[in-house]
Image: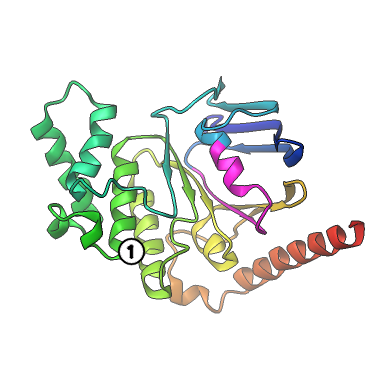
C-alpha cells in the first residue's frame, strides 16, 4: 500500500479552544477507516482538515506525501445533510461533479456518465427528479454518487447515514460496502460515525478520538473478514469483544475528563 493520508502531530484550535491535539495517524490507500468519538471530540474538524477546508495550526498533514493546503479533486466529501443543489435535477447534480473532474468532456457524455453512477446506486428511475422529490435515503445515495463521480481517491464521509431510519441506514451501509469492495482501485474512506456497530461493520480499522481536546485514544484493527454478512456477524464473538473494548475506552475517557474538571 502507498502512504495515503498521514497526520503527524496535527493540532487545531478555534480561537483559544484547542479542538485537536497531537494527532498521529497514517491511513494507507484503499483502507476503510471508521472514525469514532463523543460529540466535541473533533471528528468533523479532522475531516475538514483532511479535505483542505481548514488549515492545520500545528503538525503536518499530507496525502501521498504532498501537503494538504486546500480543497482538491483528490478528496471528495459526503456530508450528513446531502448538500445537493435543490434547483438542479439529480442527474445534473452529479454531472456538475463530473464537469469539475473532466471539463473537456462533452456535456452529453458527462450526463450519460452521471446516469451510470446513479444507476449503480439504484437511482436510475430518479435521474430527472429534483432533491425535494426524493426520500432522505435516495438523496444520500445521490450525494454518494456525486462524490464517486468526482473520481477522488480519498472519500471523506461525515455521518452520512446519521439522519436515516434503521432500515435505510442498513441498506446504505451495505450499498456503500458493495460499491467500495468492487472498485479498482479501492478508494480510501474515512467514515465518521457515533454508532459503534456501524463503525465495526464498515471499517477495516477504528480510530477513536477522546475529547477536550480531541486526541487518539484507540487505534484498532477490525478482525472480521470481507465480504461481510450482517446476519452472521450478530453472533460474532470478535464483534462483541471489539464493541465492548471501544465502549469501555470511551467511558474511561469520559470519567477521566470528569475527574479532571
Residue 228: name its quadrant.
bottom left
The segment highlighted magenta reads 31-48
As drawn, 222 above or below 113: below
Report the colour scheme: rainbow
Secondary structure state at the residue bearing disc 1: helix
Residue 206: name its quadrant.
bottom right
Q: Residue furthest bottom?
A: 235
Q: Residue furthest left?
A: 108
Q: Which residue is mark 1?
A: 136
| Residue 28 left/right relative to 146 | right
As drawn, 128 above or below 244: above
* Residue 14 percent across, percent down from the top left: 68, 38
The residue positioned 66% from the left and 38% from the top of the image is 25
| Residue 157 left/right relative to 14 | left
| The C terminus sits in image quarter | bottom right
* Residue 47 percent across, percent down from the top left: 55, 42
Of residues 149 and 206, the one nearer the viewer is 149
The residue positioned 60% from the left and 42% from the top of the image is 45
Of residues 57 and 239, the one nearer the viewer is 57
* Residue 118 percent across, percent down from the top left: 21, 51
**Mark 1 Cα shell of 10 Å, populated few (<14), some (14-19), many (≥20):** some
Q: Is residue 108 magenta?
A: no
Q: Residue furthest right?
A: 260
* Residue 92 percent across, percent down from the top left: 18, 42
Q: Is residue 38 magenta?
A: yes
Residue 249: name its quadrant.
bottom right
The residue positioned 18% from the left and 48% from the top of the image is 89
Amino acid at each position: 500500500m502507498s502512504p495515503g493520508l498521514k497526520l503527524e502531530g496535527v493540532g487545531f484550535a478555534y480561537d483559544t479552544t484547542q479542538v485537536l491535539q497531537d494527532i498521529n495517524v497514517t491511513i494507507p490507500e484503499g483502507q476503510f477507516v471508521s472514525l469514532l468519538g463523543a460529540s466535541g471530540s473533533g471528528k468533523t474538524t479532522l475531516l475538514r482538515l483532511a479535505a483542505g477546508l481548514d488549515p492545520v495550526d500545528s503538525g503536518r498533514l499530507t496525502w501521498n506525501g504532498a501537503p494538504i493546503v486546500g480543497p482538491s479533486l483528490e478528496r471528495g466529501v459526503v456530508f450528513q445533510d446531502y448538500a445537493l443543489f435543490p434547483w438542479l435535477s439529480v442527474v445534473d447534480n452529479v454531472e456538475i461533479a463530473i464537469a469539475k473532474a473532466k471539463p473537456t468532456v462533452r456535456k452529453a457524455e458527462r450526463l450519460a456518465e452521471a446516469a451510470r453512477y446513479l444507476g449503480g446506486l439504484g437511482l436510475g428511475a430518479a435521474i430527472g427528479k429534483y432533491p425535494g422529490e426524493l426520500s432522505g435515503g435516495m438523496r444520500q445515495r445521490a450525494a454518494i454518487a456525486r462524490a464517486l463521480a468526482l473520481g477522488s481517491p480519498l472519500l471523506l464521509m461525515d455521518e452520512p447515514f446519521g439522519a436515516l431510519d434503521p432500515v435505510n441506514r442498513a441498506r446504505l451501509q451495505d450499498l456503500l460496502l458493495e460499491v467500495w469492495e468492487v472498485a479498482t482501485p479501492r478508494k480510501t474512506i474515512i467514515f465518521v460515525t457515533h454508532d459503534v456497530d456501524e463503525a465495526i461493520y464498515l471499517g477495516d480499522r477504528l480510530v477513536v478520538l477522546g475529547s477536550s481536546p480531541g486526541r487518539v485514544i484507540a487505534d484498532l484493527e477490525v478482525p472480521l473478514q470481507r465480504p461481510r454478512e450482517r446476519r452472521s456477524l450478530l453472533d460474532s464473538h470478535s464483534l462483541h469483544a471489539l464493541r465492548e473494548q471501544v465502549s469501555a475506552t470511551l467511558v474511561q475517557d469520559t470519567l477521566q475528563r470528569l475527574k479532571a474538571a
